[in-house]
Image: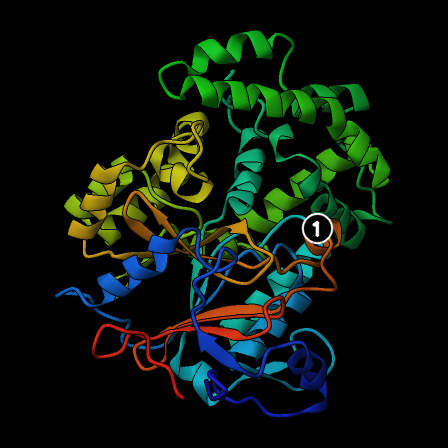
Amino acid sequence: MATQHVLPPVNDQKHHSTILSRLPTDWEAWPDDPTSVNNDEALDALLHRTHKNGFTWPKKPVVFISDPHADAEAFEASLVAAGVIEREGSNLCEYELTRFGKKAEIVIGGDCLDKGPSNLALLRSLAHLYRLKADISLLAGNHDLRLLMGLLSLERQTDAGSQHLFVRMGRKVVPLFKEVFDQYLANTHWHKGVPSEAECRQLLFPEEGWFETFPFFAAGFLTAEGIDREIGKMQSKINSFEEHCATAGLSLQQVYAASMKCRSLFLKKSGEFSWFFKKMRLVKKRGSFLFLHAGLDDQMAELLAKRGIKHINQAFKRNLMTQHLFNFYYSPLANTFRTKYRKADLPLTERGAAATKRAGIHVLVHGHVNQHNGQRIALKNGLVHIEADITLDSHSRKREGLDGYGIGVTLIDKKRGVIGLSCDYPKAKVFKPGRKGRLEEKR
C-alpha cells in the first residue's frame, strides 16, 4: 500500500515540530485486528451501513476530539494534528484557525474537566476557540456534569437521592478546587463567612444513615446492579475524599470556599466560565452519524426516532437545571453521557438499535471508553460505535503506562471517509468504502 498524508497540511513552524514528530505520516485501510475492532463483524457492519440507501455523510468535515480531561496541551496539539489551528507562539491560546479550521466543524465529545493537569487552562483554550468564531459543538461528558450536579447539590434542598452528589465527584475533582483556590482565593479573606471545618463536613458529605436509605430511595429508578455499584463507589469515595483534599493541601473549609467560587465562575451570568454549561448539548447528528459522549439505551433510541435531535437537546437543557438532581442524573438522558453498557446501565437491545436506525442514525461516535491503540470500531447489538477516546490527558497516560500527553483526532468527511489519527498507533487508520463494497486501497 502506498502512503500519503490523510489530513490537511499544517504550517511547519517551530511550535509544530514536536507535535508532528509524534504522529504517524503513513496510513492504512482500517485494520481488522483486536486493537481496532472489537470483533470480526464490526468493520463489516460499518461497511454495510455506509452502502445502505439513505446513508449520508456530514455536509462539512467533522473533527471529533473527546475526553481532553483538563489537558490543554493535549487539546491544542490535537487541534494542530487535525489541521484546524496554527500555533503562533509557544504559550497556550496562541493560535489561529487555518483555512481548513474555518470550514470544518469541531465537535468536543465531553469530559473537558477533571484529572488534569489544568482544568482552567483547558477551559481558557476552549474559550479562545470560541473567540475565533470556530464552528464548535460542545457535548456533555459525565465528568463535566458531575461538577454541575455537585455544585447544584450545595444550593438545593437535598435528600437521599442527591446529598451524596458532591462527594461523588471524588478525587478527580480535587485538582480543580485546588486551581480555583490558588488562582482566585489565596491571599484573600476567603475564610470570611465560611462555616467551620465540622460544619463544612456536614454540608459536603451525605448524612449519617445514607447507605441504609439510598437503596430504598433508588429502588424503581436503578437496577439492582446499579444500586450496588453506587453504594460501592460511595463507600470508597466517602472514606477517601477528605484524605485526597488534605494531600492537595486543602482543608474542607477551603474546598467549600472553592466550590462557592466555582458556583460563581460557572453558574453566574458574569462568571468567567458561565458559557461552559450554557453551550453544552447532549447529542449532535451530522449525516447518519450521531456524536455523543457515551452511548444510548432503548428509551433514548425510541425518543430519537419519535421526537428527534432538537427535542432531545431541549429536554436535556430543561431537565438539567429544573429537574430533581437524582431524577436527572440517573435518567435515560444522563445515561447518554454515563453508560458503558454494563449491567448497571440502562440497556441497549436490538429494539433500541432498530429505533436508532429509524432515526436515520447508523453510526455512533463517542468517547468515554479510553483506548491505548487509537480509535476502535465496536458493534453493540447491531449498532456500530466508533470509540474515539484515545487517552489524551497526561495524568491518565502516566498511570496507564503511556508517555507524555496524547495527540489525536477522529475526522469524518465524505471525501476522506473516517480517519483515526493517534500518537499511539503507527499509522493513521482510514475507512473509505469503495464503489464495489470494498475498502479503497492505493497500491
- Residue, x 65% and y 82% (percent of image)? 20
Instruction: Using the rendered image of the protein, determine whether residue 291 is visible from the camera's viewpoint.
Output: no
Colour mode of the rendering: rainbow
- The quarter holding residue 203 reads top right
- Residue, x 55% and y 81% (percent of image)? 85
- The quarter holding residue 76 reads bottom right
Mark 1: few/some/many CA within 10 Å (<14, 14-19, 20+)? few
Please give the count of numbered marks on the rendered protein: 1
Closer-to-camera residue (347/218): 347
- Residue, x 66% and y 39% (percent of image)? 260
- Residue, x 74% and y 63% (percent of image)? 403
Q: Is mark 1 on a helix, strand or loop?
A: loop
Residue 17 percent across, percent down from the top left: 70, 85
Residue occupied by mark 1? 400
Looking at the image, residue 249 sits to the left or right of residue 137; the answer is right
Amino acid type, residue under disc 1 in the picture: Glu
- The quarter holding residue 211 reads top right
Residue 276 percent across, percent down from the top left: 51, 55
Closer-to-camera residue (55/302): 55
Closer-to-camera residue (419/137): 419
The vertical placement of 221 against 394, above or below, is above
Residue 142 percent across, percent down from the top left: 51, 43
